C-alpha cells in the first residue's frame, strides 16, 4: 500500500491462501480507510476511520459482530453491535483518552448526514476503538479534535498508508514501533470468489516474544539490543475483519473468535493489562433502517465452508500485525521515549535464519 515495503517484500509469506489485489481490507469492495496523523514534538497520535461501505451507513447498516478476547479497553458501541448485530457508523480508531472527543465528533458527523436521527427516528450507535499511545504521545493533551475525525472519514480511500499513521502514530508493538497494518485473502466458493480483509491497530506485546512466521525474531532483536525489555505488557490491539462473504451475526461472531489464532502466532500471550477487541462485518448482508418488508431474506454460507474463512482470518491477522511493524518508522516521542522499527533488524533476522 502506498509503495511501502511490507513483510512480503522481505520474502516472508504468511500462510497459503492467495491475497487480494492490494492485500488490504479495502480489497473488500466498498470498504475505505482514512487517516489523520498528528506528529509534532510530543504529539504522536491521530485518527483512523474505517468505512464498511461508501453509502449512508445509518440508512443501510451492515451485519456485524464483536468479540472480546481480553477486556482491558474503552471501546464504545460493541454492546449494541452484539445485541442488534449491525454497524451503522464508520468505525473510528484513536488513543484511549480521545475516545470521548472522537465519539462526540462521530455523532456530530452522523447528525449532519441524517436529519431524522433523534427527531423522527431513534438515536445512533457510534463505534470508537482505542489503544493507549501514552508512551510516545502526550496523551493528556487532548489533541484530537472534531475536525480530525471529520477529515479521516472524508479522506477515506481504497489506498492508504500503514505503520506510523493515523491512530497508529504513537503506538508500540512488541516494544518496537507499531501502528496500522492490513492484509486480505481470497476464497473460492463454487463459482464465486470472496474476500476476507483485516485491519489492526497494534500496541501490545513483549519484545522477546515476537515471532515472524515461526522465526523467534524477538530473541534475535533482544540479543542485538543493549536495552532489555523490562516493561509490563500494558498495551492493546484492535482487530477489524471485513468480508463480502454472506454471513449471519452468529457466523461473524465465529470468525471474530479466530482472530486470536493470528495474534498468538506473532507471539502475544495476551497480557493482563492488554485489551484485545475484535469487530467483524460483512458487506453482503445489509439492514435498511426503515422497514421495507415484514420479513427479510438474507444469505449465509454453509457451515462446512467456515473452515476456509477461519483460516483466512488467522492468516490475515498475523500478516496485518507484521505489516504494522515493518512499515512503522523509528519514532522519538514524549520525554524522549523512543521505539525502533522492525525494519532496522530484518537483515540480521533473515541472516541468522539462513545460517541456521
Image: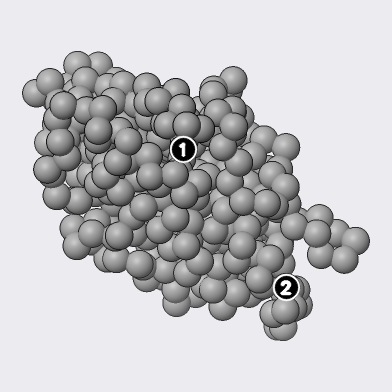
Say if mark 2 contacts mark 1, CB within 8 Å: no
Left or right of residue 222: residue 180 = right
**Marks 2, 1: nearer the viewer:** 1
| Residue placed under numbered mark 1 in the picture | 356
315 or 51: nearer the viewer: 315
| Residue placed under numbered mark 2 in the picture | 305
Task: Give the x, y percent position of residue 40.
Answer: 25, 16
- The structure's colour scheme is one colour
Q: CA distance from mark 2 to mark 1?
A: 39 Å
What residue appears at the point 72 percent right and 47 percent down from the top-left corner?
18
Q: Secondary structure at mark 2?
A: helix
Left or right of residue 49: residue 195 = right
Q: Quadrant of residue 170?
A: top left
Q: In the rendered view of the protein, which quadrant contains the N terminus?
A: top right
What residue appears at the point 40 percent right and 58 percent down from the top-left corner?
264
What residue appears at the point 57 percent right and 58 percent down from the top-left corner?
313
Amino acid at each position: 500500500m502506498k509503495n511501502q515495503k511490507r513483510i512480503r517484500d522481505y520474502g516472508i509469506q504468511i500462510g497459503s491462501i492467495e491475497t487480494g489485489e492490494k492485500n488490504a481490507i479495502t480489497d473488500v469492495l466498498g470498504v475505505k480507510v482514512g487517516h489523520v496523523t498528528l506528529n509534532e514534538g510530543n504529539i504522536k497520535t491521530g485518527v483512523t476511520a474505517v468505512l464498511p461501505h461508501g453509502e449512508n451507513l445509518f440508512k443501510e447498516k451492515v451485519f456485524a459482530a464483536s468479540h472480546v478476547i481480553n477486556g482491558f479497553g474503552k471501546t464504545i458501541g460493541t454492546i449494541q453491535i452484539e445485541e442488534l448485530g449491525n454497524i451503522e457508523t464508520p468505525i473510528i480508531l484513536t488513543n484511549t483518552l480521545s475516545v470521548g472527543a472522537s465519539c462526540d465528533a462521530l455523532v456530530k458527523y452522523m447528525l449532519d448526514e441524517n436529519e431524522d436521527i433523534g427527531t423522527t427516528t431513534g438515536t445512533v450507535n457510534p463505534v470508537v476503538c482505542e489503544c493507549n499511545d501514552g508512551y510516545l504521545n502526550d496523551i493528556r493533551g487532548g489533541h484530537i479534535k472534531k475536525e480530525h475525525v471529520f477529515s479521516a472519514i472524508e479522506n477515506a480511500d481504497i489506498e492508504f498508508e500503514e505503520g506510523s499513521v493515523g491512530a497508529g502514530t504513537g503506538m508500540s508493538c512488541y516494544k518496537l514501533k507499531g501502528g496500522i497494518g492490513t492484509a486480505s485473502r481470497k476464497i473460492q466458493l463454487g463459482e464465486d470468489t470472496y474476500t476476507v480483509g483485516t485491519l489492526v491497530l497494534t500496541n501490545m506485546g513483549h519484545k522477546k516474544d515476537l515471532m515472524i512466521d515461526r522465526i523467534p525474531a524477538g530473541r534475535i532483536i533482544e540479543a542485538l539490543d543493549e536495552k532489555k525489555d523490562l516493561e509490563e505488557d500494558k498495551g492493546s490491539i484492535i482487530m477489524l475483519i471485513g468480508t463480502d462473504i454472506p454471513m449471519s451475526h452468529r457466523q461473524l461472531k465465529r470468525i471474530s473468535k479466530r482472530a486470536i489464532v493470528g495474534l498468538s502466532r506473532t507471539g502475544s500471550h495476551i497480557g493482563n493489562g492488554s485489551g484485545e477487541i475484535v469487530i467483524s462485518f460483512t458487506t453482503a448482508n445489509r439492514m435498511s433502517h426503515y422497514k421495507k418488508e415484514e420479513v427479510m431474506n438474507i444469505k449465509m454460507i454453509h457451515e462446512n465452508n467456515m473452515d476456509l474463512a477461519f483460516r483466512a482470518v488467522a492468516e490475515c491477522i498475523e500478516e496485518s500485525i507484521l505489516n504494522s511493524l515493518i512499515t512503522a518508522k523509528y519514532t522519538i516521542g514524549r520525554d524522549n521515549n523512543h521505539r525502533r522499527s522492525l525494519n532496522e533488524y530484518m537483515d540480521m533476522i533473515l541472516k541468522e535464519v539462513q545460517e541456521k
